[in-house]
Image (cartoon, rainbow, N blue to C red):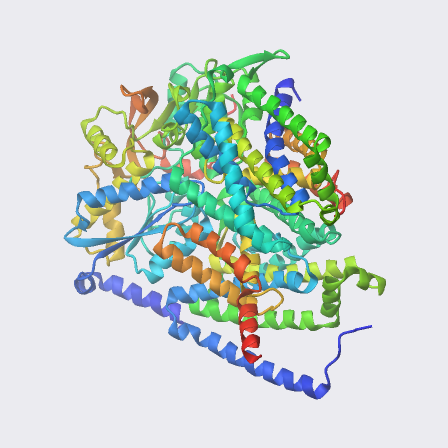
Amino acid sequence: MDRRQFLKSTTAALTIAGVGVAPWRSAQAQAGPIKIGLLAPLTGVVASGGKEMVEGVQFYLDQVKSEMAGRKVELVIEDDASNPDTALQKARRLVEQGNCHMLIGNLLANTGLAVANYVKGTGTPYFIPIIAADDLTQRRRIKNVIRVAGYSASEFTHPLGDWALKQGYKKIATISQDYTFGHEQCGGLAQVFTEGGGEIVQQFWHPLNTADFSPYLGQLADLKIDAIFAMETGADATRFIQQYASFGLKAKTPLLAAMNGTDQSVIRTLGEECEGIISPAHFAEGSDNPVTQKFAKEYEAKYGKIPSLYGFSMYSGVMWIDAALKKMGGKVEDREAFIDTVLKTELDGSPLGKAVKLDAYGNPIYDVYIRKVAKRADGKFWNVPVTTYPNVSQFWKYDPETYLKQPSYSRTFQGIKKG
Amino acid sequence: MSIFQLLNGLTFAALLFVVASGFTLIFGLLRIVNLAHGALYLFGGYIGYAIALKTGSFVLGGIGAMAAIAAIGFVLDQGLLHFVRGHELRQVLLTLGFAFVLNDLALVIWGGDSFTVPIPQMLRGGLRVFGVFYPTYRLFVLVTGIVVFAALWLLLNHTRLGALIRAGVDDAEMVEASGVNIRRVFLVTFLLGSALAGLGGLMGGAFLSLYPSADAEILVFSLAVVIIGGRGSLVGVGVGSLLVGLLNTLGQVMFPELAYFVIFGPMAVLLAFRPLGLFGRAA
Amino acid sequence: MTMPRTPKPSRLAGMNGRAALIAATIGVAAAALPLVLSNYQVGLATEVLIFGILAMSIDILAGFAGRTSLGHGAIFGVSTYVVVYATAHAGVPPAAAFAAGVLAATLVAAIFGLLAVRTSGVYFLLLTLALGMIVWGICLRWTQVTGGENGMRGDVRPALLLTNTAFYWAVLAGAAVVTFAMWRFVRSPFGLTLRGIRDSESRMRSLGYNVPLHLFIGFTVSAFFAGVAGAMYAMFNNFVSPSTVALAQSVEGVLMMIAGGVGTLFGAFVGAAAIIALENVVSAYTERWQMVLGITFILIMIFAPEGIIGKLRAILTRKVR
């Protein structure tokens, strides 16, 4: 029996012994603090989002005075530099050197996927409130990778497709960043929209960080379409919205965006060109729900900006962990139990102002807003709900098992039903 | 390719020209591959943005960006590159280290949000040219590119400084031997090249926006322009910018999956036959 | 004519004896490292070895043929990509995938070499940089195969080497073999010819040497070793994405080589250790690690261009005098 095999069977034996062993282990370790390793891009392309991730976590920890279930919480922050190789190295450091009980964070899908692949081997609980890759809670699920307070990429574009049909749109073109996150968001919209009788006229895929959108805008302007769906994040979103307006398309064709496209992190630096853009999301900072309002106001008072998706998601993610730890008396050392408890925990204190729970695949079920960018009284822009789709899961109205039999959305599979 | 896409390619080429001409001036005369050029572009954009926002003047933003980046260029050249004259590899890596510092400094000062330089009222909106509706600002970029080309051409061909620069590109030692203070010519060229990066930053910042890593993207395009055009040749930069600008548009429209390959593929083929670029001469 | 002198046999034997002793000592010390290091540090040490090989492969060209490549990171990454793809998507066993990765890197480099050997100096830098960009562009955009921005993940590492320590020992053994091979290569008659080309291309040409051919072979051999490092990296990370083939990777390799000392070959490991340690220590204490790194670059270029080994050597000789 080699060493690995030995470790495996020992762990198995301990797990079977379960009840008897766990209290002893946690009693011994409970003296120390709960160590949370936070991975966020503090430098590189998405540095501003990373900063807000840290703010979101710290905002929550300040509110609970860095204490969860009676134990001190120690937060270790590492910069993943928006680079998967670095993310991997930092994850190793947090787990192997820092002895963190859990990891949370990462913003870019590639950094998240790299870390997910790593923790698959170590078994460390890894929470991803922002990493949205569908298959992490669908076809390639890893038990210890949990999407607390996050969402899967196509979860919100399914209802957006339905909403577009209800607006009477018949023809839509999509433009998207050419990577999984984009493929999945577009796929969600394309499938629901075409199954309801709509037509996807054309789909444009461009590399991340496209300096100049004019070639695409030129082609979009020539199409006979009722609306455009744009899946853009970060600086691409800023540029797209801005160039969309400057080429005069804003006056001609309505723009539907992915939630990241009109997130505060993007529209914060924009002017009137962002007004009126439609996007679907679980969170709307301009919602009149009192809990949401309270959160947004306090956050703004503390950090001087309206909270973005990043700040909100990390805040809620940590809150979720706290809620789970409270339920199990802070015994974070018992990983199996910890993971199971998190999966079963229903979060009701989040800034959404309503209870959220995970589906059987570890992905949250939300009331999804269709939001519109509007001008606030003080001249700043924010997202205000137009309609709500209640209880939307990552599988929309499909049967999970049937849905999982179709391939993952990709550039070649968009779920488009030929009319 | 439609008129519309042609204009897209041309306006992008005009911006590339402004940025890459600064690069090639420095590369041609001082033999320095300045990998901080992209960072100078981005930093210039940020400074121009800050000034334009504060004063409400696009022109002041441009002047401020050029002056500030020239000053930073002065520090880079006199304060740092001074110590490694004549060592190509050390120069290249030193400029890269400098780029790291500048970029991180920008992150500290402005955070990582994307900014767009506010453009003056008269350049907003669109015009109808050759039967298509086209943003006024982008046409302005095109015109600026042409003006910068003309100004540089006059400078190089009709002034004493220009004659010295041209002679220096071919043989710096010879110029020095003839009693000219070549160091001063070097310095002026370096400042001019840097200022052009700053100007480019402001111009680009108004339609391509400013964000971390914008420096690397513009640097890659500039490198392609200079490699295609050849070291130290103004005409070379012009032709290189046009090629890269148009290929970029063409690639995105016709072969989206090969967008990068469409630019770099022809460049590699060209290099196989003309290692020094279209207009480059052996040093 | 000054052909390199052949040392007398006895002296050669003596040299070899001493060198072997030193090598053996270092080898044993390196092999014992996991006994004193934490698990995480063993991972770092593995990274040092892998990047040391990359830096050393760059040194073959830079230190011995006078051509500094800014495209070796891309060649390294081609191997990483092929290994991950072969194991994760094509079901090839690890050893075969490893070989395929190295082969692919060597082939890509052969194409690079054909284009690049006609240039020298700054042009060589620029050209290799541009060629590296093409590789990066393809990895980023050829989404169906490379996974695009998201990259590819898989269980690349063979089951036998799953623990950090086992993998470290395997990489150490590989590094020892590769280092010995490179050392022999630069001291071979072929290596001496490369040095001749570095010192005076025109003289070697007039002596009847086929300079481009020698450079081409030199480039390809160097790339072979970069490919070995890249394949190891695939097994180290079980993951690959475009940042592995990005310019930053090439630059990092060159920096490690310079930090160690150009033309010192073994200095590459010292340089790799210094840079990796710096990145790790600094990033643990400040968010501004990029600035610190940039300033370090600048200081090295100004004050210690001969690298750590070179600087030590200079100080020692000064003392002796």
**The image quarter in which residue B194 lies:** top right
Question: For this view, does A77 lie left or right of residue B13?
Answer: left
The N terminus of chain C: image quadrant: bottom right
**Residue under the image location 54 percent in, 22 percent down:** A217
**The image quarter in which residue A20 lies:** bottom left
Looking at this view, name the residue that lies furthest to the left.
A70
- The image shows residue A149 at horizontal and vertical percentages of 29, 39
**Residue under the image location 49 percent in, 79 percent down:** C28
Most foreground residue, A401 or A147:
A147
In the image, residue A114 above or below residue C4: above
**Residue under the image location 38 percent in, 47 percent down:** A141
- The image shows residue B133 at horizontal and vertical percentages of 57, 14
Most foreground residue, A92 or C154:
A92
Is any part of residue C67 visible from this angle? yes
Count of numbered tags: 0
Is any part of residue A345 visible from this angle? no
Question: For this view, does B93 lie left or right of residue A320?
Answer: right
The C terminus of chain C: image quadrant: bottom right
In the image, residue A391 above or below residue C265: above
- The image shows residue B277 at horizontal and vertical percentages of 73, 41
Most foreground residue, B162 or C290:
B162
In the image, residue A339 above or below residue C175: above
Looking at this view, name the residue that lies furthest to the bottom.
C10
- The image shows residue C287 at horizontal and vertical percentages of 37, 50
